[in-house]
């Protein structure tokens, strides 16, 4: 499996998506810095908010593209059959690809976070000191870890779709839809359960609750308020969000291994 992880790294570093990471880092710095100009009272907070949103989108997109490059295209081009002709178990191959992609995403997260810190620091240089400075230390890195964990869940789902799909673009499209649905599910459920519109609540609550059992609430992994306003989240909710994300990832990867091990290649 380590050879597959190393091969995934080599493939990812040679692909054009690797250069996209560098471009994303530059764009992240520029966008976060320019966004800070709209709020002279709290430029660093605005830069951090915009930067974390960009980081979330970037990591999910990079994960989808790397799965497409390292796994889906090999299945579509049937080059995976050459690899599996060696004494290599299918489960080890799939796990190697998965861990290779998520470790690449971790490196990208670190690089983009360092770029974001530069943007946040630069955003406050031309303004008077903020009364409440955002935290660019442990709180920020914990928030980035949660963003990365969200991308891991999306990568696990995309790998599962790649293991069962016979259409090369379906995993990418399904993974993107999964990410958007998981991010918006919590907000939609919270709005409906609030009872603002009784007819809407009565009609959609059972549906949303059923979907809630099938899809993870990825919005629970958004803890940007901690580094932005030093609002420490409830430890129990933090632990529950991490455990549920890891369990969901484990189930998806196990299903992917099971499906891929029984798949027939023609």
Image (cartoon, grey):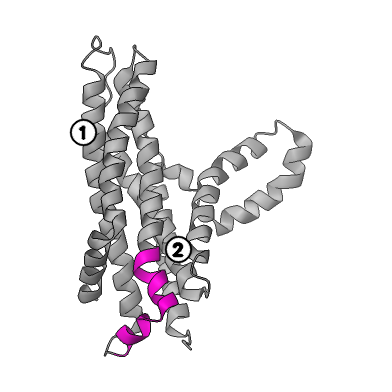
Q: Residue at coordinates 34% horizontally, 21% vertically from top-left? A: 36
Q: Residue at coordinates 47% horizontally, 48% vertically from top-left? A: 218
Q: Earlier in the sequence, mark 2 or mark 1?
A: 1
Characterize the local packing of mark 2: few (<14), some (14-19) or many (20 or more) Cα atoms within 10 angstroms. Answer: many
The local secondary structure at tag 2 comes to helix
Residue closest to the far right: 199
Q: Which mark is residue 137?
A: 1
Indicate left or right for 158 with 235 as reference. right
Q: Residue at coordinates 53% horizontally, 71% vertically from top-left? A: 167
Total marks shown come to 2
Report which quarter residue 75 is drawn in: bottom left
Q: Let me know if residue 236 appears in the view.
A: no
Q: Residue at coordinates 42% horizontally, 48% vertically from top-left? A: 241
The span picked out in magenta is 68-85
For the N terminus, the image quarter is bottom left
**Mark 2 or mark 1, whichever is nearer to me:** 2
Report which quarter residue 43 is drawn in: top left
Q: Which mark is residue 158?
A: 2
Principal secondary structure, stretch drawn in magenta? helix
The local secondary structure at tag 1 comes to loop
**Where's residue 200, x and y in %?**
75, 39
**Where's residue 251, x and y in %?**
44, 67
Q: State whether residue 184 is above or below residue 151.
A: above
Decide whether residue 27 is among the magenta residues: no
From the viewer's side, name the closer residue of 20 and 50. Answer: 20
């Amino acid at each position: 499996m380590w050879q597959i992880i190393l091969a995934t790294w080599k493939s990812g570093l040679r692909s054009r998506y690797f250069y996209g990471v560098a471009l994303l880092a530059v764009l992240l710095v520029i966008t976060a810095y320019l966004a800070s100009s709209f709020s002279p009272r709290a430029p660093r907070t605005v830069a951090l908010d915009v930067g974390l949103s960009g980081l979330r989108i970037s990591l999910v997109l990079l994960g989808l593209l790397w799965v497409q490059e390292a796994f889906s295209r090999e299945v579509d081009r049937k080059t995976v059959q050459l690899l599996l002709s060696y004494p290599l178990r299918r489960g080890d191959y799939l796990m190697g690809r998965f861990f290779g992609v998520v470790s690449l995403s971790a490196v990208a997260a670190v690089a983009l976070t360092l770029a974001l810190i530069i943007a946040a620091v630069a955003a406050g240089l031309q303004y008077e000191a903020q009364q409440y400075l955002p935290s660019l230390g442990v709180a920020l890195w914990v928030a980035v870890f949660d963003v990365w964990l969200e991308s891991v869940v999306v990568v696990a789902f995309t790998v599962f779709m790649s293991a069962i799909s016979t259409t090369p673009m379906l995993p990418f499209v399904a993974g993107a839809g999964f990410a958007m649905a998981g991010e918006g599910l919590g907000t939609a459920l919270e709005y409906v359960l609030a009872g603002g519109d009784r007819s809407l609540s009565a009609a959609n609550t059972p549906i949303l609750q059923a979907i809630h059992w099938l899809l993870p609430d990825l919005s629970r992994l958004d803890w940007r308020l901690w580094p932005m306003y030093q609002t420490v989240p409830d430890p129990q909710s933090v632990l529950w969000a991490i455990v549920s994300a890891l369990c969901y990832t484990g189930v998806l990867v196990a299903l992917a291994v099971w499906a891929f091990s029984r798949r027939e290649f023609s």
